[in-house]
């Protein structure tokens, strides 16, 4: 079975799986779709006592999106 890549429309949120060997990026709502990659789980606290002023890391999933 061939591997697939998940793409997500940034406008309407629809998700499409395409075979990995397909070179053309699918389009939705008149725009190219983006690869739907899960974010790393955040390990930093969001409370005022533990501010993230010294941690200038990449975006992460803080669990509020509801996506699994």
Image: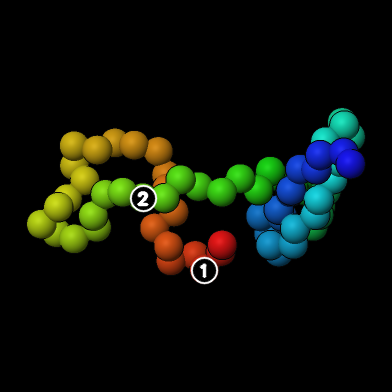
How many discs mark residues in the rendered view? 2
Residue 33 is situated, as x and y percent measured from the top left of the image, at 74, 47
Question: Which quadrant, please, contains the C terminus?
Answer: bottom right
Mark 2: give few (<14), some (14-19) or many (20+) Cα within 10 Å.
Answer: some
46 left or right of 6 in image: left
Rendered residue at 26%/49% (across/down): 44
Q: Which of the 4 quarters of the picture holds residue 23?
A: top right
Tell me, for residue 42, which label it has, or none. Answer: 2
In front of the other: 12 or 15: 15
Tell me, for residue 16, which label it has, or none. Answer: none
| Residue matched to label 1 | 66
11 left or right of 5 in image: left
Question: Which quadrant, please, contains the N terminus?
Answer: top right
Q: Which of the 4 quarters of the picture holds residue 21?
A: top right
Residue 68 lies, with reference to residue 56, above or below; the image says: below
Whether residue 11 is visible, yes or no, is yes
Identify the mark nearer the N-term, 1 or 2: 2
In front of the other: 64 or 29: 64
Residue 18 is situated, as x and y percent measured from the top left of the image, at 84, 45
Mark 1: give few (<14), some (14-19) or many (20+) Cα within 10 Å.
Answer: few
Q: Secondary structure at mark 2?
A: loop
**Marks 1 and 2, how far apart in space?**
14 Å
């Amino acid at each position: 079975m061939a591997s697939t890549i998940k793409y997500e429309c940034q406008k309407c949120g629809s998700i499409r799986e395409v075979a990995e060997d397909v070179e053309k990026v699918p389009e939705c709502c008149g725009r190219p779709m983006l690869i739907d990659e899960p974010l790393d789980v955040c390990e930093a606290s969001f409370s005022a006592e533990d501010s993230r002023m010294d941690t200038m890391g990449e975006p992460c999933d803080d669990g509020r999106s509801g996506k699994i």
